[in-house]
Image (spheres, helix red, strand yellow):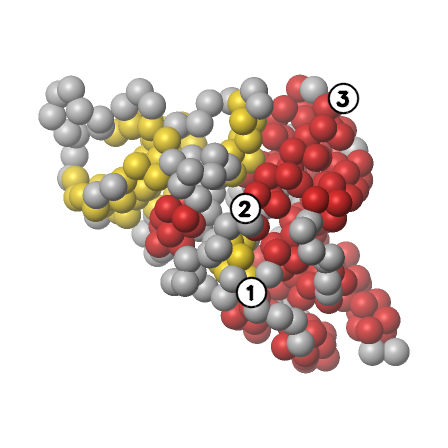
């Protein structure tokens, strides 16, 4: 892997910037030759550092696209990645809803495989990431203090955490499952990442500015196949496959709900705040 700089099309016969095939809030994805893509980050976003570190640590584990190169294109940082065939798991669910239980198991097994990988030391601690998000969320002093107290009592860890694990970020091609979009990668205990996934599966609503990811959870088939079936199947399979008993799940979930409010998804706010208030009364009764 090299770190290169390019300002325009490369010479004939080499890989070059092709048609745009994906767009998100932080980055755009373009074809790059016949068997790769290049993910170019937008100005103001620096998730390429975490994404490159995470993908490098996953080399040889067959659960994520291979990292081919790190480059700068017209002043934008980018990653050249193996092109993964197939469709994301949400699309598979939309087309074949009867596969929901098998896909829930695959979602759990792949997440467990990710958590078996040690995180690079230069990735942020997930506890610090969550603390910053809670501080930035629009919350009452009481609810913010409650969430931060719980977070303060939760453990650090050294496992690789995706940070935004949900079916829209999981590609399915035959028997291969590949996890994409790693700009939120961090290090921590598996429970921290697992409960974020449960939050997204169970409660995420559509965000108008996000055609993939969270919006997909609400709009691209998850409701039709029964998000509760998928969530329960994922949670049970993850717990069954975990090499250690899962700890502090309720506390981690509270912390993630508080942190989620920093993302400004208006449709979720009332429900999440109400859940936090009830959790406060339960934990501090």
Residue that numbered label 1 is attached to: 157
Callout 1 secondary element = loop
Pointer 3 with pointer 2, Cβ within 8 A: no
- Disc 3 versus disc 2: distance between alpha carbons? 26 Å
Q: Nearer the viewer, mark 3 or mark 1?
A: 1
Among numbered discs 2 and 1, the one appearing first in the sequence: 2
Q: CA distance from mark 3 to mark 1?
A: 37 Å
> Element at badge 2?
helix
Q: Residue at x 57, y 23 (%)?
A: 175
Do callouts 2 and 1 mark residues in contact (Cβ within 8 Å)? no
Check disc 2: other Cα within 10 Å, few if <14, some if 14-19, many if 20+: many
| Residue 47 in sight from this viewpoint | no
Looking at the rendered structure, the number of numbered marks drawn on it comes to 3
Quarter of the image containing the N terminus? top left
**Which residue corresponds to mark 3?**
98
Q: Quadrant of residue 133?
A: bottom right
x, y percent for residue 188: 55, 62
Q: Position of residue 101 (x, y in %)?
A: 76, 30
Front residue of 275 and 38: 38
Picture residue at 65% right of the left edge, 33% below the top = 106
Q: Identify the residue at horizontal 57%, vertical 57% (top origin).
A: 263
Nearer the camera: disc 3 or disc 2: 2
Residue position marked by numbered label 2 in the rendering: 114
- The quadrant holding residue 138 is bottom right
Q: x, y percentage for residue 240?
A: 75, 45
Q: Is residue 226 left or right of residue 77?
A: right
Quadrant where the image shows the C terminus: bottom right
Among the two numbered marks 3 and 2 on one chain, the one whose residue lies closer to the N terminus: 3
Q: Secondary structure at mark 3?
A: helix
Q: Is residue 175 left or right of residue 218?
A: left
């Amino acid at each position: 892997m090299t770190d290169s700089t390019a300002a325009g099309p490369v010479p004939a016969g080499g890989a070059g910037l092709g048609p745009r095939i994906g767009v998100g809030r932080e980055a755009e994805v373009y074809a790059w030759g016949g068997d790769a893509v290049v993910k170019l980050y937008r100005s103001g976003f620096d998730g390429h550092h975490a994404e490159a570190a995470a993908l490098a640590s996953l080399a040889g584990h067959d659960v994520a696209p291979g990292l081919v190169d790190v480059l700068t294109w017209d002043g934008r940082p980018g990653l050249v990645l193996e092109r993964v065939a197939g469709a994301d798991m949400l699309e598979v669910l939309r087309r074949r809803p009867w596969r929901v239980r098998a896909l829930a198991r695959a979602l759990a097994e792949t997440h467990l495989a990710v958590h078996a990988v040690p995180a690079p030391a230069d990735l942020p601690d997930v506890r610090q990431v969550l603390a910053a998000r809670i501080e930035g969320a629009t919350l009452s002093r009481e609810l913010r203090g409650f969430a931060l107290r719980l977070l303060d009592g939760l453990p650090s860890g050294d496992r690789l955490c995706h940070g935004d694990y949900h079916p829209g970020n999981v590609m399915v091609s035959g028997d291969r499952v590949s996890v994409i979009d790693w700009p939120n990668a961090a290090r921590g205990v598996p429970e921290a990442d697992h409960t974020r996934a449960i939050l997204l599966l169970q409660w995420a609503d559509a965000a108008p500015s996000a055609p993939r990811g969270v919006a997909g959870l609400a709009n691209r088939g998850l409701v039709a196949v029964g998000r509760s079936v998928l969530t329960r199947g994922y949670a049970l399979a993850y717990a069954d496959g975990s090499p250690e008993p899962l700890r502090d799940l309720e506390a981690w979930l509270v912390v993630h709900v508080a942190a989620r409010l920093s993302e400004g998804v208006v449709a979720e706010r009332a429900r999440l705040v109400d859940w936090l208030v009830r959790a406060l009364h339960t934990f501090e009764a």
